[in-house]
Image (spheres, grey):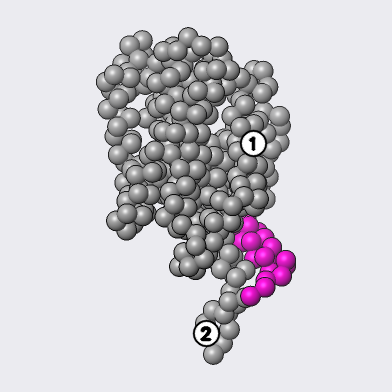
Amino acid sequence: MRLEPIKNPTLARKLVPPAIALVSTIVIASLLAMIAGANPFSVIGLILKGSFGSQFAILETLNRATPLIFTGLAVAVAFRAKFWNIGAEAQLYAGALMTVLLGTGVLPWPSFAILSLIIVASILAGAIVLLVPALLKTRFGVDEVVTTLLFNFIFLLLISMLLEGVLKDPTGMGWPKSARVIPEARLPRIVNGLRLHWGFGLAIFSAICIWIIQTRSTLGYEMRAVGLNKDAAAFAGIPVNVVIVKTALLSGGLAALAGFSEVAGLKGSLTLDLSPGFGYTGIIVAMLALLNPLGVLVAALFVAGIFVGADSMSRAADVPTYLADIMLATALLLMVLAIMLTRFRVVRD
């Protein structure tokens, strides 16, 4: 048996395998719920109710989806050009660090001015962090999977050192956290009294902008060309290394916005546990979205809904929340298989 490429896959060929992958994920999760001693239909219902069953649940799901949209976009942009950015976690913390440095009262500016400055500074910080692996790849051929992954640990250690040193809040009763950002540097709430903030609106705007760039711009065409065949792109006159660097700058800036939105919109200060793995989960989001920027919005809501719903389900059905992690891992593995089946068919020799 071998895999044979499909030259012009039909719409059904593109949609059916991913749909089967999602249904299979739900079936597997139901079986695991049965093993845990719960009613599988009840578990799925509790997940849906906990994530979308009330105004509070919906807003919490949107709130959880916000950083996943940013990191999902960052991964989707990089992967589209075959630049394997595994370091969105480091870029997220770079954006969060810049938010704290500029947003804790250093600049007594009005809200619009200081927020605009912090957004730009966060994007630049994340872009610079990913620029290093990009230059190492283009100049010396260093594998970016290794360098971007290692940057995650480097940045976590750097943040830990800063929070135990110069950035430590003197009024924090010894806890390793930074001072809180001033009200002028906070993103306003979309709904008063609830946690959803305008970082979610910025995430939607970013997804639309990335979709326009990828489908309507020269850079988007060059990114796709480099991703499809780097040698052919170079033969056609596309500066491959320049495109990779531009892609890295864009990807790093997007991931940094996740850190900005978490600090300025939700947490208000920088802590070592600011991200419970948003950078890594962004890989799952991007793959579920088939690297489509608009699909990232749907995939991020799906992943966020599982996490938020699993928390509620765990309390109601006495089922471990690890079920959500298994569901996401299963969804990713099956989606990778589904993507392969949209482009190849299995034939017998």
In this rendering, the answer to whether 4 lies above or below 334 is below
Quarter of the image where the C terminus is located: bottom right
**Which residue is denoted by mark 2 in the rendering?**
1
Q: Amino acid at mark 2?
A: Met
Q: Residue 273 is drawn in which quadrant? A: top left
Q: Which residues are magenta?
A: 7-31
First of labels 1, 2 by sequence position: 2
Identity of the residue drawn at 58% across and 17% down = 112
Q: Amino acid at mark 1?
A: Phe
Residue 271 visible in the shown view: yes
Q: Residue 127 is drawn in which quadrant? A: top left
Q: Is residue 322 magenta?
A: no
Q: Residue 160 is drawn in which quadrant? A: top left
**Which residue is denoted by mark 1 in the rendering?**
205
Mark 2 Cα shell of 10 Å, populated few (<14), some (14-19), many (≥20)? few
In this rendering, the answer to whether 263 lies above or below 170 is below
Q: Secondary structure at mark 1?
A: helix
